Image (spheres, rainbow, N blue to C red):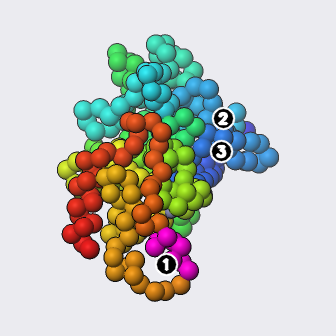
Amino acid sequence: MGIVAAADADSAVRLRAFAFLEEQTRLHGDGLPWSVLSRGFEYEGRRVPLVGPQGIFTPAVLRLPLTITTAPVVVGKERPYDDHVGADGLLEYRYRGTDARHRDNTGLREAMQRKIPLVYLHGVVKGWYVAAWPVFVVADDAARLTFTVAVGQQPAPLSGEQSLADLELETDGERRYATRATLVRLHQQGFRIRVLEAYRQRCAICRLRHRELLEAAHILPDGHPRGGAVVPNGIALCTLHHAAFDRNVLGVRPDLTVEVRLDVLHEVDGPMLEHGLQGFHGAAITVPRAEHLRPDRDFLAERYELFRNAS
Ligand SMILES: [Zn+2]
């Protein structure tokens, strides 16, 4: 294979990977299961997985890495590699091991020099990942055994022929902005995954178990000073009950009892109103068994006040 053909194949595989991730993210509602990533997609009859046993992963069809992954935090265990956001607002990604010349590290270095886009996979809980693409390695610090990674721009679907190198943002300001926006998005996607995991993929009110129809409701709203994206500020709800909770059609008392707003409770309509909303008045929500994952009572009390005022 000539240099041009190899470069074309490299770009084609990367574009297929981006399309695959977009499709799978839509299908699974933000998060990606490990099984889907490790199965990957087909390219010219060959399977292209997106993850392997190590953080820096090069599938057999490519010469340079396709993905960089951080493992989920296991409670009571340290991350295998401590990845985090650096002082400049960009991602820091640790070398594999301490040998700067290890194949995985030289691969990322070459991807940096040739402006080759990669996929960043962030482990949220065991078995679930959120993805960002395209990302570029923009700096290499051998003394700290660390690469700096910045988010690039999405390829425009209809622009036809394009060089993937052009997806790298040019100025530090643009890179910081795109990286920050992406990290915020990944954090929100992670919130949904962590809350659904804590509630065992069920609506806390009706126990519906269709992951595609489940969402993570904030008890204290997103902009609230204490309304963080943490599990004790979340409740797993189906789309109907999430909307009803957000719009104060129903509330949850600090003792975990559901209250339907009085006017709605006395309305006469069809079976959906009767079974979907009125029927849960006075019922208890189902919360996680682990104490530290249950809704914070103070958050519930504050939110319940808002519900009472809206009634
Ligand atoms: Zn529900």
Magenta-drawn stretch contains 275: yes
Magenta-drawn stretch contains 16: no
In terms of secondary structure, what is the magenta stretch mainly?
helix
Q: Indicate the quadrant where residue 140 lies.
A: top left
Asked if the residue at label 1 sits under 8 Å from ligand 1, the reply is no
Of labels 2 and 3, the one closer to you: 3
The image shows residue 259 at horizontal and vertical percentages of: 37, 65
At label 3, the amino acid type is Val
Circle 2 sits in a helix, a strand or a loop, which is it?
A: loop
Q: Which residue is mark 3?
A: 36
Q: Which residue is mark 1?
A: 273
Of labels 1 and 3, the one closer to you: 1
Q: Say if 75 sits above or below 116 in the image.
A: above
The image shows residue 255 at horizontal and vertical percentages of: 34, 51
Residue found 51% across the figure and 77% down from its top: 274
Q: Which residue is mark 2?
A: 59
Mark 3 surroundings: few (<14), some (14-19) or many (≥20) residues within 10 A? some
Mark 2 surroundings: few (<14), some (14-19) or many (≥20) residues within 10 A? some
Mark 1 surroundings: few (<14), some (14-19) or many (≥20) residues within 10 A? some
Report the side of 186 relative to 128 (left or right). left
Q: Indicate the quadrant where residue 62 lies.
A: top right
Circle 3 sits in a helix, a strand or a loop, which is it?
A: helix
Residue range (magenta) = 271-279
The image shows residue 10 at horizontal and vertical percentages of: 62, 43
